[in-house]
Image (tube, grey):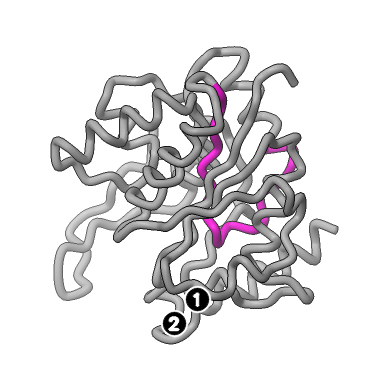
Amino acid sequence: MSHKIWAVIPAAGSGSRFSKTELKQYQVIQGKTVLEHTVARVNDLPLSGYVLAISADDSVAKTLNFTQSDKAHFCEGGAERVHSVLNALTYLSQIAAPEDLVFVHDAARPCVTLECLKHLVDTAVHENCSAILAIPVRDTLKFVERAHRIDKTVSRDHLWQAQTPQISRLAVLKQAIENALQDGITITDEASALEYMGEPVKVVQGRSDNIKITYADDLELAKLILMSQK
């Protein structure tokens, strides 16, 4: 693969929806933390390196047994996910070329498959664009504004549920995030920053088992998925 590929994993979040006291990325599945599983998955690709953005008081991350640990880099995370990603991209700018490809992948998304990762890279390379994994929305959507009362049904036509990784050129993504933050735009994922800048982003169909561990019961589902993928 001629293009250098790097990964950024923002792992400084508080995980408040998972537990008030425990961080979801450090829950253990089959003898490894969620974060170790996630890092192992992205390293199924020939990465040049990966950057973990962790909180200043994180005493766990640097003690873990990561796959390809010689390629691991650490930087301090920020107040929100987007700030952690930007910090990691700034760090990466010192060791990577502006045109290098960068994956941004959620720390608590340990079930992504190599097939999906390859498809994402192929799309970014052959179509020279940014790209994200996503799946078409399959359930009926309800708009609920208050008091758990349905206001209306929302058409799911043309709607996709965004996943990670999301891939882009290093310089393009860094510039997009900086511009969006400067203009006070809410950035929920990397694609939203690229969209704001007018950068084309291609959707690559992923898989429904590429779940993000957000709530406590997601951990049990992730365990089952990881067992079934072996």
Taking 154 as reference, is 146 above or below it? below
The kind of residue on which mark 2 rests is Ser
Please give the name of the residue rendered at 37% of the width and 32% of the height, measured from the top-left corner.
Answer: 174
Please give the name of the residue rendered at 14% of the width and 42% of the height, measured from the top-left corner.
Answer: 184
Please give the name of the residue rendered at 59% of the width and 50% of the height, measured from the top-left corner.
Answer: 73
Taking 99 as reference, is 150 above or below it? below
Q: Are marks 1 and 2 in contact (CB under 8 Å)?
A: yes
Mark 1 lies on residue: 23
For the record, the magenta segment spans 100-116
Taking 213 as reference, is 104 above or below it? above
User: How far across and how far down the image is residue 228, in percent?
Assistant: 80, 62
Q: Quadrant of residue 39?
A: bottom right
Name the one closer to the observer, 201 or 159: 201
Q: Secondary structure at mark 2?
A: loop
Label 2, residues with CA under 10 Å away: few <14, some 14-19, many ≥20: few
Question: Foreground mark, 1 or 2?
Answer: 1
Residue furthest right as drawn: 230
The kind of residue on which mark 1 rests is Leu
Q: Which mark is residue 19?
A: 2
In the image, taking residue 150 as reference, residue 193 lies left or right, namely right
Pick the quarter of the image with the C terminus: bottom right
Residue furthest bottom as drawn: 21
Instruction: Report how many numbered discs are placed on residues in the image.
Output: 2
Examine the structure image and report whether residue 21 is included in the region drawn in magenta. Answer: no
Name the one closer to the observer, 203 or 64: 64
Please give the name of the residue rendered at 40% of the width and 30% of the height, measured from the top-left corner.
Answer: 173
Pick the quarter of the image with the N terminus: top right
